Amino acid sequence: MNVVYVASEVFPFFKTGGLADVMYSLPRKMSRIGHDVSVIMPKYSQISQIYTRKMEHVISVEYSGRVFNIYKIVEGYVIYYFVENKELFERSQVYGCDDEDIQFSVFCEIVLKFLRKIQLKADIIHCNDWQTGLLPFFLKKRYILSDEFFANMKTVFTIHNLMYQGKFSKTSLHRLGYDVEGDGLNFMRIGMEYADIVTTVSKTYAEEIKYPYFSEGLEDMTTSKKIYGVLNGIDVIYFNPERNSSIYVNYNIYTRKDKAKNKMFLQQEMKLPETAETPVISMITRLVEGKGMDLVRYNIEELLKDPVQIIILGSGDKQYEEFFWNLEKKYPSKFKIKLGYDPVLANKIYAGSDMFLMPSRYEPCGLSQMIAMKFGTIPIVRETGGLKDTVTSYNKYTGEGNGFTFANFNADDMLYTLRRAERYYFNDKGVWDKLIERNMNLDFSWIRSAREYEKLYWIAKGDKVLKADLAEK
């Protein structure tokens, strides 16, 4: 098939979150399994000159009195296209402008006009999150009806996080000229309504968003539409402790005892006492309510009574940043906070920690728990979204499980689960080593996810056999 991915951000060109990582890995894997793959994103001023110098001008497209220049970079077997318009996309910030409705609606329209102009007959246009939500609408309501070129194109729309929907006031209806009922526009809702296939980034999240607690006001859509859950993968080559150049000492499943050396060097770098027996519990996260920061804030001082060390890397809401900053002053030998994000330090923390905590209120997929497990760090998570799909609680009777989990969004349940993990860490090294080995053996590669998306693409194209096969599963 000829597959075109459309997104507002793509690593390594521009990244604010996990969407960019997905748009780096998934297209590459789809190309490797035999499809023709293109990726289209806006050309922001924030894109490094390392990449803009490589860009080759392809064509210009005129629309609504504006000229859009399209550039490309070819990496491997993937073609990356960039839509340039200085007025719309070259600004001091990428997200949060007052005219985001104009920015991204025009982006969606230009994608379709560009495909027509270069005669790129996509079988599948895979749209991602609200910024691309109008593209399925445009395709079905404007382009297919007026131009046979688009007749066989199908759209897949992936929800990466339902909280961010692209809601705009009713004035958008007038200035964009859309015939949509209601008081305003919701780009996410429109994408879900008009796409041929709707997906989200884990099977559990696909089920959770049917309920008001998770649906963010869109339960009428999440209950009426068939939404497929496809778990994201991670870059298992980069996040490989045997090869990763960021960590202190490389190791693999057979030399996993060298993980302890990474812990010692991490303690040194973070200015914590170098004690091999003290478990290091880490978090690499945004400091926001949805990531469970209130649970951590409520019980972290109780946890610090235990013989543990805690390291947090991340930034977010001021209230949490100040709380953890003050906590470090109070417990300098047991707790460290590094504000911001440092990818090199992140890898060192994954490799040097014993436990990785993710007490999220909701987590559509989550990548950090998978990365931690590949580094042999034991996950402690709340049973939600992708966390539930990737981590199962250790069962002392059957020996099954690969981490420690709790169901309720409750600070005491989180503390109880952490202390349960501590007991195994201190008292049963055999079980602990078995969990490390088990996690390092898990397959979180993108090839598995790519094969699932491939099935959905064929379903969108009308393959009834695959549709029946997927329905059974």
Image (tube, helix red, strand yellow):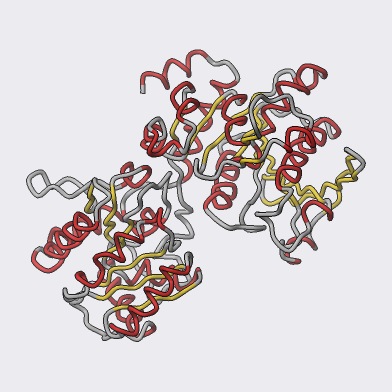
Q: Which of 449 and 185 is in front in this view?
A: 185
Residue in the image at 51% along x and 32% along y? 453
The quadrant where residue 423 appears = bottom left
Q: In which quarter of the image is the N terminus?
A: top right
**Number of numbered discs:** 0
- Is residue 18 shown above or below 256? above
Q: Which residue lies furthest to the top in this view?
A: 464
The quadrant where residue 270 appears = bottom left
In the displayed structure image, the side of residue 431 where residue 9 appears, left or right:
right
Residue in the image at 86% along x and 50% along y? 57
In the displayed structure image, the side of residue 283 where residue 151 appears, left or right:
right
Q: Nearer the viewer, residue 400 or 393?
A: 393
The quadrant where residue 29 appears = top right
Q: Quadrant of the C terminus?
A: top left
Q: Position of residue 184 (x, y in %)?
A: 65, 34
Residue in the image at 38% along x and 32% along y? 211
- Is residue 31 shown above or below 467? below
Q: Where is residue 172 in the image (x, y as percent from the top left)?
A: 73, 37
Q: Position of residue 255 (x, y in %)?
A: 28, 67
Residue in the image at 41% along x and 64% along y? 284
Q: Position of residue 119 (x, y in %)?
A: 82, 30
- Is residue 447 shown above or below 227? below
